Image: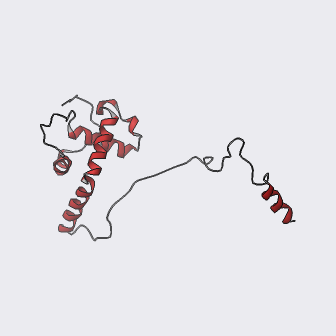
Amino acid sequence: METQARKPYPSDVSDEEWAFVAPSLTLMTPNAPQRRYELREIFNALRWIVRTGAPWRDLPAPYGKWQTVYSRFRRWRAAGMWDEILRILQWEAACNDEQDGSLAMLDGTNVRGHQQAAGQRKKGAPTPHSTAAGAAGAASCT
């Protein structure tokens, strides 16, 4: 396993959070030969991506290759790990009377487009009034 000392990021998981999530993340035995990176570092990298909203390719180098983090994210998603963690959180909240059942999940997806991103015509595309139907429609309106 590769471990490099790096400067901690604010998005890094705390020891308490890691103790909660680590059992759900383990898809193979800890000594599996194909595990090259520490799970905690991959999880920290994923938290950085989620916190910053940056593209995968912009992952800081100290976290390792973005392809590794993305691949692990997809494996965890396919294995239902995120659903499992949500179920555990909901169960614990219900047991502690902290959940009323009205909230199931939060999604921070945010998509923005430039104000000129919509409506720009491509070069050579006909305008609505340059076609025969548009010209006929325009003539009949008068």
What is the count of numbered marks?
Answer: 0
Q: Is residue 10 visible in the rendered structure shown here?
A: no
Residue 84 in the figure: left or right of residue 141: left
Residue at coordinates 30% horizontally, 36% vertically from top-left?
Answer: 68
* Residue 67 sits in quarter: top left
Residue 107 in the figure: left or right of residue 141: left
> Picture coordinates of residue 48 (x, y %)?
33, 41
> Picture coordinates of residue 125 (x, y %)?
71, 46
Residue at coordinates 17% horizontally, 51% vertically from top-left?
Answer: 20
Q: Is residue 22 visible in the rendered structure shown here?
A: yes
* Residue 32 sits in quarter: top left
Looking at the rendered image, the quarter that the N terminus falls into is top left
Q: Residue furthest front?
A: 132
45 relative to 113, above or below: above
* Residue 11 sits in quarter: top left
Residue at coordinates 22% horizontally, 28% vertically from top-left?
Answer: 5
